[in-house]
Image (tube, rainbow, N blue to C red):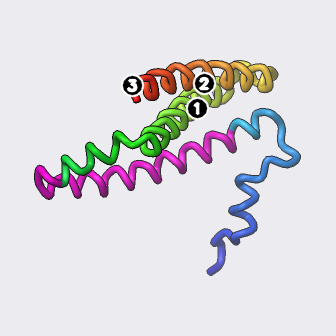
């Protein structure tokens, strides 16, 4: 079909080689955004299954107390934090704020994200 992107072009969308710090941050936002979309899809499926009655709900709660699922939840929280803070960076640069300081802004995104992710990790695994 004419005009449709080739698989090679799609993969280039995620290729960080030869990009500036701003490009790396934009790729990070693409990856976390796709991860959040995947999670949302799975979340809707699980919510539908929970409509099947009390036994489905009880088995879901038991499953979610498993450390593997808690780690999965931490990944979702991490993606949301990174995507949100990095999205603010992208928005600022889109309005012409800090365009010359992409690397420093990316370091700030990484630092803030790291602190928040560590906070949530301690809170989530502290009760296990």
Reading the image, the residue beneath label 3 is: 127
3D distance between C-alphas at marks 3 and 1: 24 Å
Which element type, helix, strand or loop, lies under badge 1? helix
Q: Earlier in the sequence, mark 1 or mark 2?
A: 1
Reading the image, the residue beneath label 1 is: 82
14 is higher (above) or lower (below) than 113: below
* Nearer to us in this view, 28 or 23: 28
Magenta residues (range): 26-55
Q: Earlier in the sequence, mark 3 or mark 1?
A: 1
Question: How would you rate the neighbour count of disc 1 (Cα within 10 Å): few for under 14, some for 14-19, many for 20 or more?
Answer: many
Quadrant where the N terminus lies?
bottom right
Q: Residue at 34% of width from left, 43% of height from top? A: 64
Which element type, helix, strand or loop, lies under badge 3? loop
Q: Nearer the viewer, mark 3 or mark 1?
A: 3
Q: Nearer the viewer, mark 3 or mark 2?
A: 3
Please provide percent x and percent y for residue 10.
69, 62
Image quarter of residue 97: top right
Disc 3 to disc 2: CB gap under 8 Å: no
Q: Residue at 60% of width from left, 18% of height from top? A: 115
């Amino acid at each position: 079909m004419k005009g449709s992107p080739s698989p090679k072009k799609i993969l280039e969308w995620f290729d960080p080689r030869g990009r500036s710090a701003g490009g790396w941050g934009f790729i990070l936002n693409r990856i976390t955004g796709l991860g959040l979309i995947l999670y949302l899809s799975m979340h809707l499926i699980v919510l539908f299954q929970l409509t099947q009655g009390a036994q489905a709900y009880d088995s879901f709660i038991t499953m979610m107390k498993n450390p593997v699922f808690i780690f999965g939840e931490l990944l979702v929280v991490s993606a949301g934090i990174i995507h949100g803070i990095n999205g603010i960076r992208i928005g600022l640069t889109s309005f012409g704020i800090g365009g010359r300081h992409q690397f420093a802004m990316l370091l700030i995104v990484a630092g803030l994200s790291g602190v928040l992710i560590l906070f949530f990790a301690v809170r989530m695994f502290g009760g296990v």
